[in-house]
Amino acid sequence: MTKLDRRALLGAALFASAAAAAQAREPADPAEVVRLWPGRPPGAPGVLPVTQVRDRIATSGFQDRIATSIGEPLMTVFRPARPNGAAVLVIPGGGYVRVVIDKEGFETARRLADAGITAFVLRYRLPGDGWASPADVPLQDAQRAVRLIRAGAAGWGIDPSRVAAMGFSAGGHVAASLSTRHAAAVYRPVDAADAQSARPDLAALIYPVIDMAPPNAHPGSRAQLLGPDPSSEAEAAYSPHRHVGAHVPPTFLLHAMDDDSVPVENSLAYLAALRAAKVPAEAHLFEEGGHGFGLRLIQGNPAAAWPDLFLAWAARRGLLKAG
């Protein structure tokens, strides 16, 4: 074996050891999981997809799991030590081809739980897995999740009038769709929980996908949701900024202006629509930050202040008042 070979092996071993150590430092996942549907989800194919979870720790250096082929959508519940009665449905991104579990999901939920908020991380179905209404399956799951949170509010110590939704990237598109189409009949009621409202009381959109039409559309999310060559009518139907009205909840927006995956114009379009409809809104634009930073990848950057900015805004909007 040459010196070069030995160095390569040593480097690989050191990286693997560091990755294993990073994984070992991660907090344990909560045991409380809520499955969204009592039977097969709406529009299920003959054979349900089998959820696949993969950890990208080898490339990221920290636990960074993703879920694909999601056949059984669910929420993972993060209960705070001192609950204040507020709840947030956390909707991670992933370009509608995956759902990011840790970076935008569990890490965000832990930060919210530290602030007394009961957080529910949504693992939603993806449009490319054979569902009957592919473009609506993420919204079906988001509506159902909010209804289940409200239906179970007493057991979780939640005020059903203080339920927010927070979405990242493609999850921001889900949250914006939930905000604008919370009353849309995208599935048939399956039990008493579906009598609850699906409208979030507040929404937070973090570097969200909004526009489904070029030039500002995120090409991957657009193709996954609507297909390779959608009509202008489909683009308009699934561009949430085109459906903002007085029914939309107060909204917090955050975006980095150097985002080269989802242009900042997505947030600006939604903000303009909120202002035109006189919906209360707060927006924070940062010069730097890129895309997909969550919490961990933005440390040392001014955009790292975003959780505190959100919590301060949520407190002003009444989400964090004493229960």
Image (cartoon, rainbow, N blue to C red):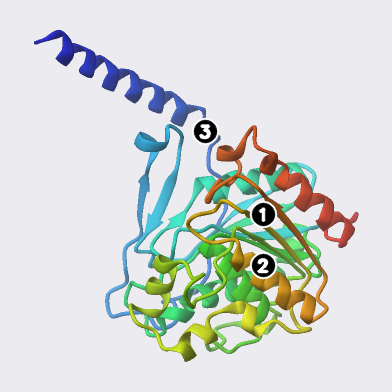
Instruction: Give the distance between the C-alpha atoms of the residues marked 1 and 3, in whole angstroms.
Output: 18 Å
Report the mark closest to the observer, 2 or 3: 2
Of callouts 2 and 3, the N-terminal one: 3
Mark 1 lies on residue: 119
**Can you say which quadrant of the picture contains the N terminus?**
top left
Whether residue 20 is visible: yes
Percent position of residue 205, x then y: 65, 62
Question: Callout 2, which amino acid?
Answer: Leu
Percent position of residue 274, x then y: 75, 75
> Residue 254 got which mark?
none
Q: Which structural element holds mark 1? A: strand
Residue at the spot x=31%, y=68% of the render? 49
Q: Which structural element holds mark 2? A: helix
Instruction: Give the distance between the C-alpha atoms of the residues marked 1 and 2, in whole angstroms.
Output: 27 Å
> Residue 26 got which mark?
3
Q: Are marks 1 and 2 in contact (CB under 8 Å)?
A: no
Percent position of residue 225, x then y: 42, 75
Of callouts 1 and 2, the N-terminal one: 1
Looking at this view, is 79 or 3 the one in front? Answer: 3
Percent position of residue 170, x then y: 51, 64
Question: Callout 3, which amino acid?
Answer: Glu
Q: Residues within 10 Å of mark 3 (few under 14, many from 20)?
A: few
Looking at this view, is 156 or 48 the one in front? Answer: 48
Residue at the spot x=47%, y=75% of the render? 214
Looking at this view, is 239 or 136 the one in front? Answer: 239
